[in-house]
Amino acid sequence: METIKALLTELPDRQQDAVKAELDHLASIADETGMMGAVQVCAGQGIDLEGLEGVQDVLLMLATNHPRMIDRVAVQASLMRRNGGRQWARFQFPDDGKPWVLDLPSAREAFLVDAVAILDLTEHRKREADWYQSVRIDPASGGEITLTQATIYVEEYAQSELSFGEKSLERKTVQKVLEVGLASDPNERVVEICAKGGKAFREQYIKMFATHFAPQSELPVEVPRRDVLLETLRADPQFETEPADGIDRVEVSSLSFRSSDGGFARFEKRAEDETLYGFLDRRFGQASPLRAGGWQILAATLRIMLEARGGKGKRTLTVNLSAPNTTTLPNKTETDRQFVFGLLERWKLLASPPSKADLFEVVK
């Protein structure tokens, strides 16, 4: 550090400010989340990180060889820190098979124009939309998920200003601010949006996304942000039903686990005459991930078998739940969605709704 300071003192003030700002920028993402963001972004761009030791080595390599990637890593880290928070929302489009046009230049340009209109930026402040791909590892399956992402931010590179220290004036850096971030998964028909301004603003952004990139599909619905309580499924649950529900039976057809040492396991129901819980007890006994310590339930699949009613034959509603707050409810009809949502509440698989205090959000 002293060597760096000595080198900086030989530079003119403005160059010192620029270098200090960039170093502070790297320091702000030199943590576990920044490393995860670097891995996801570099995987999407085909950048090999093998042989590099630690986040500092990775960030210095990117700053030297791929300077554009640093901004993307910073954005990715910001999205992950906010994921599930008050500035984040997840939207589910209907699985209608209709194509998206995420790579269409005219659609991207139109989206940026509309986003800037919402941001209400002054003319002199430059803005940019950066499109790229990233790769996430699905915690439930361990498979790779390729996402198409975009970030919109004000193009004001890190600047510095003077602030009063204990004994003298000190330089303080000011970083550029991410305004809007989105991550889209065309296969699962899911879009995540991270933006300031509250729910109303995020709804405007998702409407713009639908207009420009999914013009043939109906508007998506926001996925509930309440945490799923997967520990409820650790003991073989007795799903409470009522005659009016028209439910023949309910079963847990799959469970996914991660161990404290990083191991992963997924089990699916196979035999019709044995439940998944019965199989795990028979196969593993006390070593079952449902009984042994150190295993966390990451995801589960429920199958709700409905009786034939109202001119409709028997059918099955499949519900996937993933920690911390992801669920795919049947989205063919709003009736099915509300029906399943009510069942999940009844079966204690959803956390209590947020209070008014939790919903309060400062709009900047």
Image: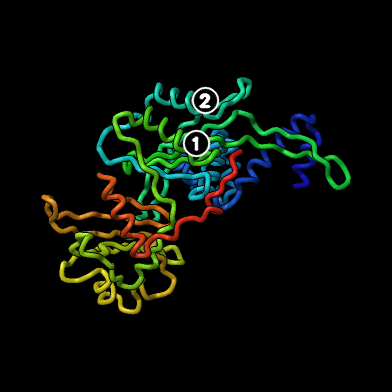
Residue 353 horizontal side relative to residue 238, left or right: right
Disc 2, SS:
helix
Residue drawn at the location 19% of the way across and 55% of the way down: 316
Residue 353 seen in the figure: yes
Residue drawn at the location 52% of the way across and 32% of the way down: 152
Residue 51 seen in the figure: no
- Against 356, residue 200 (above or below) is above
Name, please, the residue furthest toward the front: 244
State the image quarter where residue 259 is shown.
bottom left
Which of the two residues, 26 or 280, is positioned nearer the viewer here?
Answer: 280
- Against 97, residue 28 (above or below) is below
How far across and down, in percent of the image, does residue 323 sit?
Answer: 41, 57
Residue 117, labelled with which disc? 2
Residue drawn at the location 74% of the way across and 30% of the way down: 15
State the image quarter where residue 248 is shown.
bottom left
Instruction: Name the amino acid, label 1.
Output: Phe
State the image quarter where residue 96 is shown.
top left
Name, please, the residue furthest toward the bottom: 286
Name the N-terminal-most of marks 1 and 2: 2
Disc 1, SS:
helix
Q: Residues within 10 Å of mark 1 (few under 14, many from 20)?
A: some
How far across and down, in percent of the image, does residue 92 sit?
Answer: 35, 43
Q: Residues within 10 Å of mark 2 (few under 14, many from 20)?
A: few
Residue 201, labelled with which disc? 1
Residue drawn at the location 46% of the way across and 67% of the way down: 260
Which of the two residues, 288 or 315, is positioned nearer the viewer here?
Answer: 315
